[in-house]
Image (spheres, rainbow, N blue to C red):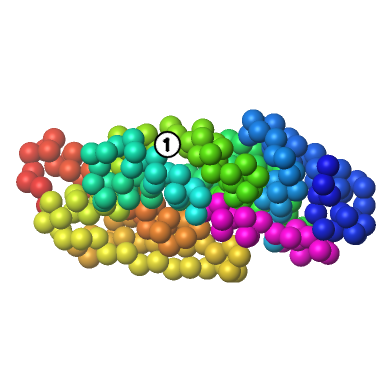
Amino acid sequence: MPSTTSWQSSGRADAGLVGSVEHGAERLAARLGRRLSDPTLLVRALSHRSWCGEQEGALSNERLEFLGDAVLGLVVAQHSYLTHPDFPEGKLAKVRSAVVNAKVLAEVAEELGIGEVLLLGKGEEASGGRTKVSILSDALEAVIGAVYLDAGWAATGPFVLGLLGDRIERAADEPDDFDHKSRLQELTVRNGAGPPRYSVIGSGPDHDRRYVADVRVGGVSRGMGQGSSKKDAEQDAARQAWLALQQVESTREQSGEPGA
């Protein structure tokens, strides 16, 4: 077996740590249903930068995450394009954005138990890093990048579809169920209130930024949302506003009042 990382081969890590790292990667490989020919790639995919900062010579998963993000987007785009030849560009984009986002990827990472085997630094461990959406989604993209480097495109497409196929088809059936901002705007414009207006505030360190969004319709705050990105926070706020306005519409219909 190749050495797990550069720090292992250089003797900078003790045997207990090396064994623990390898065991975590092996457990994940079993859950993924595939054993990589180069196991060091999977170890790298699980290596958060906070952990690498405490292990001399260790390399983080950031480069694999970058690659995996591109591969993931192409797999979803190609599958949607070939499976739904009647979809216009706008609907294809909605399907892709509904699936290729941090919240969905973190859900899949949780299902795979990636959080359990992540390599985190002491500070990130103490702050609940194993359940953070941004860390989980990044790790899943890194895993996809690792599979691509290890097995190539022919194996990576089926692997990604095995993880996300059901979600892709649900998004294809009802893309607006995932794109809350579009659904909210359609409702507010139809009711004569005009397009929603969003304001977003970010807080926290760069590596763990959190955002809170407020969406106003006709000058009135209708929903608040949170997320690890501005986009996710706005989508969450739009979902809350859409539900609230749907309830208002339902009440008006029951009372016989005219709509907004």
Question: On the image, numbered disc 1 is attached to which residue?
Answer: 167
The residue range painted magenta reads 50-69
User: What residue is rendered at 27% in x and 64% in y?
Assistant: 197
Please tell me which residue lies in front, 198 or 115: 115
Quadrant where the N terminus lies? top right
Can you give x and y, in whole percent of width and height, for residue 171 in the image?
Answer: 35, 39
The spot of residue 257 in percent (x, y) is 8, 43
Asked whether 17 or 238 is in front, the reply is: 17
Residue 113 visible within the image: yes
Q: Position of residue 57 (x, y in %)?
A: 81, 63
Residue 219 vertical position relative to residue 91 in the rendered view, above or below: below
How many marks can you see? 1
Q: Tell me where residue 211 appears, x and y as whole percent.
A: 47, 62
Looking at the rendered structure, the kind of residue marked 1 is Arg
x 26%, y 50%: residue: 89
In magenta segment, residue 39? no
In the figure, 91 relative to 224: above or below?
above
The local crowd at label 1, few if under 14, some if 14 to 19, many if 20 or more residues have their Cα within 10 Å, is some
Taking the magenta stretch, the answer to whether it contains residue 56 is: yes
